[in-house]
Image (cartoon, rainbow, N blue to C red):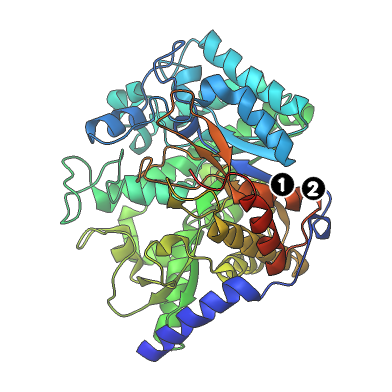
Amino acid sequence: MKHFYLFSIILAIVLATSYIDAFTRTDFPEDFLFGAATSAYQWEGAVDEDGRTPSVWDTSSHCHNGSNGDIACDGYHKYKEDVKLMADMGLEAFRFSISWSRLIPNGRGPINPKGLLFYKNLIKELRSHGIEPHVTLYHYDLPQSLEDEYGGWINRKIIEDFTAFADVCFREFGDDVKLWTTINEATIFAFAFYGEGIKFGHCSPTKYINCSTGNSCMETYIAGHNMLLAHASASSLYKLKYKSKQRGSIGLSIFSLGLSPYTNSKDDEIATQRAKAFLYGWMLKPLVYGDYPDEMKRTLGSRLPVFSKEESEKVKGSSDFVGIIHYTTVYVTNRPAPYIFPSSTNKGFFTDMGAYIISAGNSSSFLFDAIPWGLEGILEHLKQSYNNPPIYILENGTPMKHDSMLQDRPRVEYIQAYIGAVLNAIKNGSDMRGYFVWSLIDLYEITVGYTTSFGMYYVNFSDPGRKRSPKLSASWYTGFLNGTIDVASQDITQLQSNFSAGSSSL
């Protein structure tokens, strides 16, 4: 097994850098969207301005005595500058999220007029530059008032409140927004924040995390169930009340590790199929077929919530597309091995899954190793098992130390490898609709704050003006989008040489 693992690491590195033929933007369908992404709390700042109230993300970032998003990139005040950067890049779409507590400060009830104006202005600015807004309704920032009132996503009251919030967004922004994602990476949101207790969720105490509230063996699946029902409710509302006039699309996004058997043994193959059922099928099976995977039903028994007939019919077909959040690929084995995510000793999601996850890369940040064949595997699986749904890659990127050189060649190689994987999937028949780099600019990141970053533009967080500076990746993406770069290794070398003529360090 050890030799197989070492060989796989070498193969992954080789494939990540050399298996893709040269390509250009024109090789993709004309209506395919290339964009970049952010989220409200990570980009906007201005957390206590113009009527915004705290979200659970505010509360968590402050009570953990670490960095926070109080100012972040100051996108709230600098959005016009950032849209100008997007336009100069030739960006075709921009994915951002709505801060629920900025738009509706109490979680329900009166709309905040200044919050409403900000999002209207942002969307108008994007549209005026020919950039398609892709709006995520929920990116982890539940109004703290709703968490305090009833516990957020573990209570079915969230379905009504989320639907009312979505209704406001559809009504106020829907004439200019044609792409809606209801909930960001619902899978990891449920198991990480309600099972593992990361940041602002609930969990049972474990040797990894000192949780004082929650029940990991139950709440992971209750939260996930309520997310599906809330998504379906918002989707039903949109299609009933808005779609015929606004003619937009609405989908759900999931966190998607690439999954590959650690060895060619039957046990590891079965473990991989079980992992796919838990990590993909948990959300996708209800969305496509109306019920949870059999593997989850057998394992979880009464711990897995049950859809009523009416709920099943409402969830089934409620996504016009699937949003994929993908960063890397892992190996799956049936034998005990280190987890990527910490897990409760006998109650966690991964224990329930009954499969062990091992890094398929060899870097210190293996969650972001470039292993593009893993993405192709996900897309092929969705094509074969879930009726080939329309797919947007809503996040894909790699972190680097924040105060490093502006010449982020590893990020360029990573992005071009994954764009090549998307093109291969299109050629193989997957219904791909768009690709978004995470992220447009350096952001406040959920687990590492400001120490590492994903941006194509550097943000000087020590500067009150939050100055933006282009990295090599911004130049590469610009060249790719405007057709001056034919993707091949020598083009990166030439681009890097040209970039070096300017300012290439911080």
Q: Are marks 2 and 1 in contact (CB under 8 Å)?
A: yes
Instruction: Give the residue drawn at x 41%, y 81%.
Output: 268
How many C-alpha atoms fall within 10 Å of the one at disc 1: few (<14), some, or many (≥20)?
some
Can you tell which mark lies on residue 482?
Answer: 2
Q: Is residue 313 shown left or right of residue 104?
A: right
User: At numbered mark 1, what does the secondary structure look like: helix, strand or loop?
Assistant: helix
Q: Please give the name of the residue rendered at 15% of the width and 41% of the height, measured from the top-left corner.
A: 212
Q: In the image, which disc is placed on residue 92?
A: none
408, above or below 89, in the image:
below
Left or right of 35? Residue 343 is left
Element class at badge 2: helix
Q: Which image quarter: residue 374?
A: bottom right
Q: Which residue is mark 1?
A: 478
- Quadrant containing the N terminus in the rendered view: bottom left
Residue occupying the point 64% across, 23% down: 80
Task: Determine crowd level at label 2: few under 14, some 14-19, many 20+ residues with C-alpha closer than 10 A.
Answer: some
Please tell me which residue is depicted at 19% across the width and 40% down the height of the picture: 213
| Residue closer to the observer: 308 or 450 | 450
Residue 351 screen position, x and y as percent: 29, 65
Say if residue 1 shows up in the picture: no
Q: Amino acid at mark 2?
A: Asn
Please name the amino acid that badge 1 sits on: Thr
- CA distance for labels 2 and 1: 6 Å
Residue 299: x and y in percent read: 34, 65
Percent position (x, y) of residue 84? 68, 29
- Of residues 473 and 300, the one nearer the viewer is 473
Q: Nearer the viewer, residue 419 or 216?
A: 419
Determine whether 216 is above or below 371 in the image.
Answer: above
